[in-house]
Image (cartoon, grey):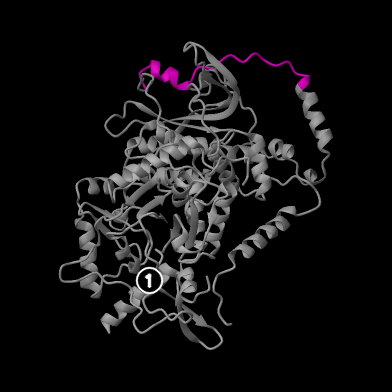
Amino acid sequence: MGYVAVSGGSEAIEASIRLLDYYRSGTDKDLDIETVAEKLSLLVDRVMGEAGLYSKTYAALALKQCEGCIEEAVFLLRAYRSTLTRNYYSNVLDSNNMRVVRRISSAFKDIEGGQILGATYDYTHRLINFEIGSEDAGALRMNVLEELNSQRPEEIAPCPRVSDELKKEGLIETVLPDKAEPFDITENLLEYPADRSARLQTLSRADTGFLSGLAYSSLRGFGGAHPTVGELRTGYVEVNVPYLFDEAQEIYLGEVLITEVEIFSEADDEDKLKLAVGYGAVFGRNENKAIAAAILDRELETGGPYPSQNEEFVLTHGDSLEMSGFLSHLKLPHYVTFQSKLDAVRKTRGGKA
Amino acid sequence: MNKNYNFAFIDEGSKREIRRTILKAVAIPGYQVPFGSRELPIGRGWGTGGIQITLSLIGPDDVLKVIDQGSDESVNAVNIKKFVGLCTDVRTTVKTSEATIIQTRHRIPETPLRNDQILVLQVPIPEPLRIVEASEEKTKKMHAEKDYAPMWLLLYESLIKYGKITLGTEYPLMVEGRYIMNPSPIPKFDNPKLNDSECLYLFGAGREKKIYAIPPHTLAESLAFEDVPFEKESFKGKRCRLCGSEDTYLDEMFDSSTGEKMYQCSDTSYCQEVRGCI
């Protein structure tokens, strides 16, 4: 037979999945989960953030299962979330009391609590280090631990925010804490105009590349923000859930590593005398994403004609799972729909002739 | 059945929430009810809205049929059946008449459905007005105000420009004279089956987080003008090369060795039934 009707799908799928094992097996060396979780931290952070599930081990496992594909790993973790019963909502995280590991401001040289450079690739020369190809992992680990242990840890006091000072001066609007129940984007359809809580959650889970590109477009001129990074802080914050039998108490669950960014920008055209703030928070050390989220928070607050200022455009199109799902569905057969399209085109041509 | 997961995968609280959404959809035919769509282990855009409906409705005694483009054997149909099987153990069938729940993508079976059957359609873009308005905020208002002028204008302009309405699949319908709805990418050929039907039609859009319904015996009319009636795809003078049917939706195929064009039923199980194979 000269044509191929798509049938016998079961065997084809089984064989395709076995072939994936061939690709995944790669070499006879194993990649253990701890190695992925601890040596590819930034990749793991990105996957946890876009999945909205904080578990280094599961993120590493997911990455191993899908040959390191970010979208697939996010997909695995998201699907896993759907099977878990949600027992608690945590109390609002208090990032004022963050155990800071890095904190910088591009707005002021001296900030209360001090700048802490922490770990960053920003000032490295991006030269491939060929020695890493044959390094002794054990020795490397021992060296860094030795250096760490020889130092006395400094007491870290909770730092005030850079924006607090500007608020005191009246340069930034002081807003009262919003006690309203936050919108939950994981259990509701996001409707527009969206609450700010919904916006910030959506940005926080969004695809890193999507946010970076949009924020970049805004910086280049397709937008209004001229942002300064008021503060970028990375560190550990406590997660607590309310104690059911006593409202005043809470139960400590553990801590998560997050990066928070506040950018400062002009308030708006009418009010050049004030500064406005954009905020972004993400899991792990995904700094550019946090900056991009903060820029977009500001752009969406202002609104305007550019893509980065269009709430529906920004918030609807950045979910990794949704974009990769819809794009990949184009690979499914579309015989019926295409036949209908053909019919419409042929009829139209017939009508013209 | 994989015992690590709940029956039908999704946790019971979420399933109940989806069933409540379905009830609301049935109560307001053609209206898109928002819901907290859950992530599934299947691609978002690959039928997750339909699957969530199926999973929230299915019980141990149900008999499931899944088709994709009319075919039970298509890779995606097989994949979905495999997934539901993995977490429920329900019986599956290819015979339309045997199924209690039929999940489908892009087709409605040729065999007429009964009042004890539910057809679940997978929907990529639930919003019928999306082709005239990109913003969800605006289309929501248009539905609320029954402002369907841009839609009618689109059809009219198509007529003026090309002498025909050039929409193919996803041809919009007016439900009970109130809401314009998107029947999902089924061909126009299948649109009339939605009107005054015996069975319940449920539409699920997972990525877009909407569920809507056409209950039995609901008026669902394909949009048309008084002097320009609605027109289906036509296969005049053509017949299925296997079963000889002349009244079914046909897939077109080429024999690459002879260059000959051939036609075959898109509903493969109907074709097999006509031939007495199943």
Q: Is residue B16 visible in this depiction of the protein?
A: yes
Residue B82 position, x and y percent, is 58, 55
Residue A150 colored in magenta in the image:
yes
Residue B207 position, x and y percent, is 44, 48
* Residue that protrudes farthest toward the left in the picture: B226
Comparing A192 with B45, the one in front is B45
In screen coordinates, is A300 left or right of A159? Answer: left
Task: Count every numbered label the image shows and give the total.
Answer: 1
Residue A156 colored in magenta in the image:
yes
For label 1, count other residues whose C-alpha is less than 10 Å away and answer few (under 14), some (14-19) or many (20+).
many
Comparing B55 with A187, the one in front is B55
In screen coordinates, is B128 left or right of A284? Answer: left
Q: Which residue is rendered at x = 31% and y = 33% of the image?
A: A268
In screen coordinates, is B92 left or right of A13? Answer: left
Amino acid type for the residue under numbered disc 1 = Ser
Q: Is residue A325 above or below residue B223?
A: above
Q: Which residue is rendered at x = 31% and y = 49% of the image?
A: B135
Q: Is residue A44 above or below residue B190?
A: above
Residue A276 position, x and y percent, is 37, 28
Residue A199 position, x and y percent, is 41, 36
Q: Which residue is rendered at x = 68% and y = 46% of the image?
A: A64
* The C terminus of chain A: image quadrant: bottom left
Magenta-colored span? A149-171
Comparing A124 with A172, the one in front is A172
The residue wearing badge 1 is A340
Q: Is residue A130 above or below residue A99?
A: below
Q: Is residue A102 visible in this depiction of the protein?
A: no
Chain for disc number 1: A
* The N terminus of chain A: image quadrant: bottom right
Comparing A75 with B34, the one in front is B34
